Amino acid sequence: MTKHKLRHLPSVDKLLQADSATHLISLYGRETVLQKLRSVIDDARQNLLNDVDVNVDDLAILGTAQHQLEIAFMPTLRPVLNATGVIIHTNLGRALLSIDARQAVQEVASHYSNLEFTLETGKRGSRYLHAEELLKEITGAEAALVVNNNAAALVLALSSLAQGKSVVISRSQLVEIGGGFRVPDIMAQSGARLVEVGTTNRTRLSDYGNAIDDETAMLLRVHSSNFQIIGFVENTELVDMATLAHQHNLICADDLGSGALIDTEKYGLSHEPTVQESIAAGADLVMFSGDKLLGGTQAGIMVGKSEIIARLKKHPLARAMRADKLCYAALSATLDHYRRDEVTEKIPVWQMISAPIETLQSRVEAWIENIGAGDIIPGESTVGGGSLPGTTLPTVLLALNPDSAETFAAELRAAKMPVISRIMDNRVLFDPRTILPEQDELFIKILKSVL
């Protein structure tokens, strides 16, 4: 019976005359649509020859072609809704940009700019100047430099300031960051020699002092970021490291990682060392990320003494690692929120961190009322992104009980706007802390469609 349908297969020429085919051609090009229609017809013909019943009318063939083209042309990098409760979710792109930062990126992306042009003189300028004054004002540092990420900042610092020399670091700080990148490996690539001191849990100032010799260039502190050592622990204060380094005419560098510029304790979190504290403690160079607690775009930010930053800017690697115009636009707009004291009002990361539990409760209640299903349960949100390990924020969760949690979560990920959830005890959980209030309507619509 199915083979009798072969004579009803439409011709490619006939399909190309349909209005829907004209629309597809406008989106994907005539040759691409032509090849796809031929492919769909060939597949249908083969199915019929194998006695597999398929719909072969014009609309069915065109619909299949359209679906396959949509999938083929779908970008691999897509926006998603993060309902996991992990605020700085590394796998989901870390920090969201503020409205002002997004607008700044759009402005610079759609116009020529003075990236390396001095408007006052009409001559070539330096991109390194962008965001530098803001960083100096906010952190109290003498100078600043922006590169493409914090790992690059560490490589540049070690290559410029300690190549062929030794760098003293505590054993407890030889960390592995996301993606399998290890601090010892990064140091080796820079040409600096690693000198480990202390033990896993205790490193004293005398350990640093005993390791200093004629080949030493730097004392380095690296923030543990994504883990904690608790119990019988002793760490050397940065101010003491800086004093010791300066007594021996050495550089004291601090890799802070997360880039906190405000007091995290005000928002119910444990204390995260701030960039300002490191500068005040006497560090010659402080390095941190732009897309973690700072709440901006991916960047490696280096602040410190003028003579140190000047050396970094002149190193050949600085060009290979430099930030682009879109990074400068987003970063400058984000830093401006700090200057205007509007961090919790404008920067999404801090909006999420500071969100009152009562507001989260009200939003989940509204979700349940709209979708007509689910329960409210207590839960915990995390900061994520290697920031404040072990610290959580109380939250409330929407809990749904589908027949199969894994299947339901997969269907949500397959939505046109994918929703990323959590699964616990065969329940699918959604944390309102990491879904922006303006995304609620879209989130509810997606849940309804899948339910």
Image: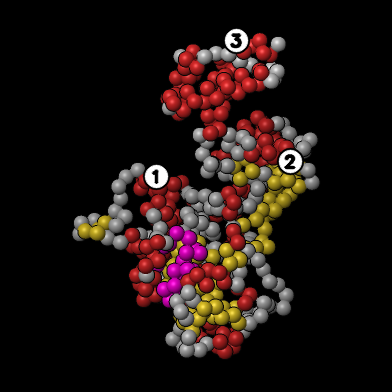
Q: Which residues, given as a range, are shown in magenta?
A: 144-161
Give the residue type at disc 1: Gln
Dot 3, crowdedness within 10 Å: few (<14), some or many (≥20)? few
Q: Which mark is residue 301?
A: none
Residue at 54% x, 80% y: name it: 168
- Give the alpha-carbon distance from disc 1 to disc 2, as whole Å: 38 Å
The tag earlier along the polypeptide, 2 or 3, is 3
Give the residue type at disc 3: Arg
Residue 265 in sight here: no
* In-front residue for pair 188/255: 188
Residue designated by label 2: 406
Q: Element type at marker 3?
A: helix
The tag earlier along the polypeptide, 1 or 2, is 1
Q: Which mark is residue 7?
A: 3
- Give the alpha-carbon distance from disc 3 to disc 1, as whole Å: 53 Å
Residue 119 found in image quarter = bottom left
- Give the alpha-carbon distance from disc 2 to disc 3, as whole Å: 43 Å
The answer to whether residue 200 is above or below residue 390 is: below
Residue designated by label 1: 106
Dot 1, crowdedness within 10 Å: few (<14), some or many (≥20)? some
Image coordinates of residue 282 in percent, x first then y, are 47, 78
Residue at 32% x, 45% y: name it: 111
Side of 142 relative to 346 (left or right)? left
Give the residue type at disc 2: Glu
Please identify, in this view, whether the residue under mark 3 or under mark 1 is nearer the observer. 3
* In-front residue for pair 213/412: 213
The tag earlier along the polypeptide, 3 or 1, is 3
